[in-house]
Image (cartoon, rainbow, N blue to C red):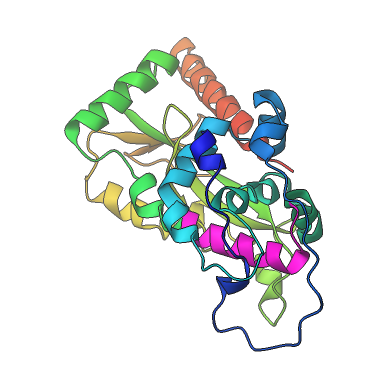
């Protein structure tokens, strides 16, 4: 870890080589804290919602995308750029994020955009439904061992992300009853996100998002057969998507619903971890 922490300092000026020239004020060098050394593991997790090892693993995956040209004496290492995960974890304003990492608000804004694009570029390799028969069977067995549900390969749920109004004539489409933006995800037994749909505004119902998703088409075509998904009562019951029973009467039906409740509680705890 020391090797990564001691990475050669890079400039933060050339994040956008096409920036229009403007007269710059005299630059004041600020001390940029090494947050890996300042906090112990618990303090670090409390602030970033991630373990140090996880952050280092992510850095390894994207550090080549974060390297920027040297310029003058300014310095912002890839590891400090990645520490803008603080912004994702807390939803703090850009000024708070900039102060936290020892950079200006304008630099923090550019760094957040750059890191976000770098992380998003990993989605094709990091967010995947089980592909092979072995992966499907392994996931099914894990769900059964934990929740006594056979054939399950994932749990689908909708959540919402608070955003500022995008403005314009379509702004109200993004407002749900809490003013949030909609996000549909599927998690496996380890709460790892294996599918995500993030293109719908907050006024759209979870079931509608799923109905228009590529995942639904893949399930309809039997790509994951005999695998099934579990969802809450907001989703329609399908041969590949099971939801709780509205009026259970038998012991078996009550047991089925109890397993659903256990799963939903696990998903809620996962979502709560990233609540601001």
Residue 142 position by quadrant? top left
Residue projecting furthest to the left: 133
Toward which corner of the image does residue 146 lie, by quadrant? top left
Res. 64 in view: yes
Residue 133 screen position, x and y as percent? 18, 33
Left or right: where 264 falls relative to 31: left
- Residue that appears at 40% across and 57% down: 213
Assess whether residue 114 is covered by the magenta stretch. Answer: yes
Q: Is residue 57 above or below residue 65?
A: above
Q: Residue at point 40% right, 53% down? A: 122
Q: Is residue 234 left or right of residue 132?
A: right
Q: Nearer the viewer, residue 11 or 16?
A: 11
User: What is the quadrant of the C terminus in the image?
Assistant: top right
Residue in the image at 51% along x and 31% along y = 53
Q: Residue furthest front?
A: 73
Answer whether residue 273 is visible to the viewer in this image.
no
Magenta run includes residue 71: no
Residue range (magenta): 102-119
Most extreme residue toward the top is 251
Nearest the viewer among 27 and 187 is 27
């Amino acid at each position: 870890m020391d090797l990564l922490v001691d990475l050669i300092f890079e400039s933060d000026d050339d994040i956008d080589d096409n920036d229009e020239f403007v007269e710059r004020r005299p630059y004041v060098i600020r001390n940029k804290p090494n947050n890996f050394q300042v906090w112990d593991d618990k303090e670090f997790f409390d602030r970033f919602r991630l373990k140090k090892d996880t952050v280092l693993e992510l850095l390894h995956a994207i550090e080549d995308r974060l390297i920027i040209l040297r310029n003058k004496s300014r310095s912002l290492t890839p590891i400090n750029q990645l520490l803008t995960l603080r912004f994702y974890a807390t939803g703090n304003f850009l000024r708070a994020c900039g102060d936290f990492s020892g950079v200006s608000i304008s630099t923090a804004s550019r760094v957040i955009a750059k890191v976000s694009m770098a992380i998003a570029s990993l989605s094709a390799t990091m967010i995947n439904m089980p592909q092979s028969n072995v992966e499907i069977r392994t996931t099914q067995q894990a769900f059964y061992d934990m929740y006594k549900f056979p054939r399950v390969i994932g749990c689908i749920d909708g959540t919402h992300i608070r955003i500022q109004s995008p403005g314009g004539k379509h702004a109200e489409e993004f407002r749900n009853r809490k003013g949030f933006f909609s996000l549909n995800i599927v998690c496996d037994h380890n709460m790892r996100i294996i599918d995500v749909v993030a293109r719908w505004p907050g006024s759209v119902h979870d079931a509608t998002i799923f109905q228009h998703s590529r995942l639904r088409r893949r399930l309809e075509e039997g790509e994951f057969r005999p695998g099934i998904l579990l969802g809450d009562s907001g989703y329609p019951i399908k041969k590949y998507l099971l939801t709780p029973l509205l009026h259970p009467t038998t012991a078996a039906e009550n047991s089925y619903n109890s397993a659903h409740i256990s799963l939903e509680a696990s998903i809620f705890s996962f979502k709560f971890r990233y609540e601001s």
